[in-house]
Amino acid sequence: MTTWRRCIFALALAFAIAFTTGCRVAAGPQVTLEFWTISLQPFFTDYINGLIAAYERANPGVKITWVDVQLQAIEQKMLAALAGRVAPDVVNLNVEFTVRIAERNALVDLDDAVPGTERAKYFEGLWTSARFKGRTFGIPWYIAPPVLMYNTELFKKAGLDPMNPPATEDEMIQAARQIKDRAKVYGFMPLVDGTRLMHRFLENGLPVLSSDGKRAVFNSPAHAAYLQRYIELYKRDYFPEDTLRRGFTGAVERFSAGQLGMLVTGPQFLLRVKASNPEVYAQTSVAPYPAGKGKVIHAGLMTLTVPRASRHQQEAMKFALYVTNDENQLAFSRLAVTLPSTKRAAADPFFKQSGAGPESKAREIAADELESSRDLTVVVSNQSELYKIFREAVEGAFFGKMSARQALDWAVREWNARL
């Protein structure tokens, strides 16, 4: 056979093989899904890449493009993508952002899109957390009930017993005062900045909305007294000014630098402390969240959403349910020190195992807190506008522009004019 004929034969054979295997070699992926997450790189890069690789192997017609976005940028990036008609297909959002995007009629209604048998795998309270006007727009992914991290060396320096950390909000405030007075560093950066004050109200049995959800009611004497207590602590320099400007980000940075006695956060942030300052990590112990009077704990829930602008909604939904299934949530929890949102995964004995490091203890504490944990994000129409009003009121009170009662009265009037 001549060289020319051998080439023709080889090409014909290659074509025949491709044809008999459905042309998979030549055709490549039929669908490309863009998947956005929030701040998972670099700590969980290998996990997400492995998750995607396994899915692509099981679904050869699908390719997943992963984009990780910082928390402070996710909402604006999402809004820009929607406006530019280049929306991703599966997007990780917290409950607040989920509701805000759903209000624009930009997300798929998951109560319609997800079969009841699939919905039943998730804790009901978590499935309904990302609701707007009675409909769910976010598939529950991972949840992080907060724990109390504290610096044992600063406790000792302040004359506090590291074996007896504060168990209530009142005890935490007293410990923070003692750390500032004796150890000469801030004891805490309380979670009272902006809209997070709403969570503290609810944790203390103080409602934000009326029972029918049609009126704001957060201006009672009890609400004002609660806010005033923290204003007095601020005026007396028991927590820093950047608590109100930088909130959680500033608190993590101060704690990691050994300049904050206590940090209330999800247990997954132990990994960030460990990476940024091993010395402080070695001094860190954990305890249950110092609860308020309402016997409920705000726990931030992360969701997966599917934009209505996705050109591949069915494939996107399938991938989102894959990411949040029992096996994958359990595998993520083993790495991330978070809790799963599915019943079967949360019941795994892994969450009761003890270990040497603070991560194991934090995980066990958080698992015990699941019963009293909920995402307490206040869901209202015109959320962006109403939240802005609330933030202005809180800042006005802290910076002395209004009294606590005047600030809350003003915010309630503005809310009720819009609800």
Image (tube, helix red, strand yellow):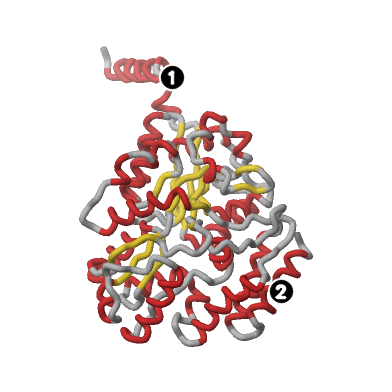
Q: Work out whether residue 317 or residue 78 is closer to the camera in this orientation and state it.
A: 317
Q: Which amino acid type is shown beneath numbered disc 1?
A: Gly
- Image quarter in which the C terminus is found: bottom right
Q: In the rendering, at what x and y percent does residue 374 appear?
A: 51, 52
- Inspect this view and state whether residue 90 appears: no
- Image quarter in which the N terminus is found: top left
Q: Residue at x 30, y 72 (%)?
A: 151
Q: Specify whether 10 is left or right of 24.
A: left
Disc nearest the viewer among 1 and 2: 2
Residue 22 bears which disc, if any?
Answer: 1
Q: Secondary structure at mark 2?
A: helix
Q: Residue at x 40, y 34 (%)?
A: 56
Q: Work out whether residue 114 or residue 70 is closer to the camera in this orientation and state it.
A: 114
Q: In the rendering, at what x and y percent does residue 43 appear?
A: 33, 55
- Asked which quadrant contains residue 417, the reply is bottom right
Q: Measured along the vertical axis of the image, is residue 277 above or below residue 52?
A: below
Q: Residue at x 23, y 52 (%)?
A: 355
Q: Specify whether 226 is left or right of 47.
A: right
Residue identifier under label 2: 409
- Inspect this view and state whether residue 73 appears: yes
Q: Work out whether residue 273 or residue 32 is closer to the camera in this orientation and state it.
A: 273
